[in-house]
Amino acid sequence: MFRPQTRQSQARSAFGMLELIFHATVRNIRKSHGNAVIGLLMNIFQTLMLVAVFYFLMNVMGMRRNAIRGDFVLYIFSGVFMFMTHTKTMAAVIKAEGPTSPMMKHGPMNTIVAISAAAVGALYTQVLSASVILYFYHAAITPISIDDPVGVMAMLMLSWASGLAIGMVFMAAMPWAPDLFGIVSQIYMRANMIASGKMFVANMMPSYILKMFDWNPLFHTIDQGRGYMFLNYNPHFSNTSYPLKVTIACLMIGLMAESFTRKHASASWSAKR
């Protein structure tokens, strides 16, 4: 508050903001566990457990024959990695520190930095976990071949961006009705276990079932990601423009709603809860 105000160039201000986001990201990652290695191992274990559950279910339910021709485990990885990235990013953004957080009393800190740190921290954890899992699968079990790694990574980033945008909408709405929007966000994340379509191949789904999935941007990114991953799969019932439009729309709504919420923030909002 009593620091002398000095003029800074736009480039210096931008680098200062990036440095602040970096340090906030490190702090955000270390909040989950004091030991970074154990925190990473816990996230890898969660991902592997989900992969094992879907592998077992698809074998028991006889859905393996409907999978894309190629490595079946890699097919499961393609859905689980994007689902985890989308869901974990959304949850991290919803839980990001808001305008009434004690951290906001520090001069350079603001809610955009907190949101960016939460989202980047979730992306870092998920990409590192996926890289470790794929490396050990490739080295210890069987060599893997990805047709277009750049396209797969682009779809993973789009899954992350859509999770960030949707999370911002929920984060901005949460202070006004915490119980209601907390339940709605949980319903959305739980519904994505099925609605993301990670267990299904869009090209093999009947039209009346496809209508129950194509509203979800994550369904499109997973299906398009499999199109980039497998040489012999060409997705016909999904596209990249729909999740991109939903992401941009939710991001704009989230930014406007967060700005409105920040201006009306009060530390006494949760006094009666």
Image (cartoon, helix red, strand yellow):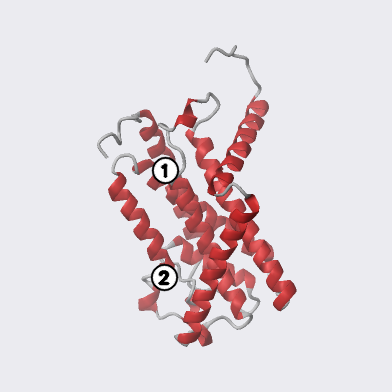
Three-letter amino acid code of the residue under disc 2: Ile
Q: Position of residue 249 (x, y in %)?
A: 43, 48
Name which residue lies at 52% across and 87% down: 65
Q: Nearer the viewer, residue 222 or 53?
A: 53
Please state, as top left, top right, bottom left or bottom right, where the C terminus lies in the image. top left
Q: Residue furthest left?
A: 272
Is 52 or 39 nearer to us in this picture? 39
Which image quadrant is residue 225 in? bottom right
Identify the residue shown where x is 43% and y is 67%.
Answer: 193
Distance, label 1 to label 2, CA atoms, is 25 Å
Q: Is residue 116 left or right of residue 183?
A: right
- Counting from the top left corner in percent of width and height, residue 269 is at 30, 34
Density class for disc 1 (Cα within 10 Å; few <14, some 14-19, many ≥20) is: many
**Can you see residue 14?**
yes
Q: Is residue 192 above or below residue 208?
A: above
> Is 27 rendered above or below residue 84?
above
Residue 254's disc is: 1
Pick the residue in front: 84 or 152.
84
**Left-right relation of 73 to 173:** right
Front position among marks 1 and 2: 2
At 52% from the left and 61% from the top, the residue drawn is 84
Determine the secondary structure under disc 1.
Answer: helix
What's under tag 1, amino acid-wise?
Answer: Gly
Residue topped by disc 2: 194
Say which of 155 and 124 sits in front. Answer: 124
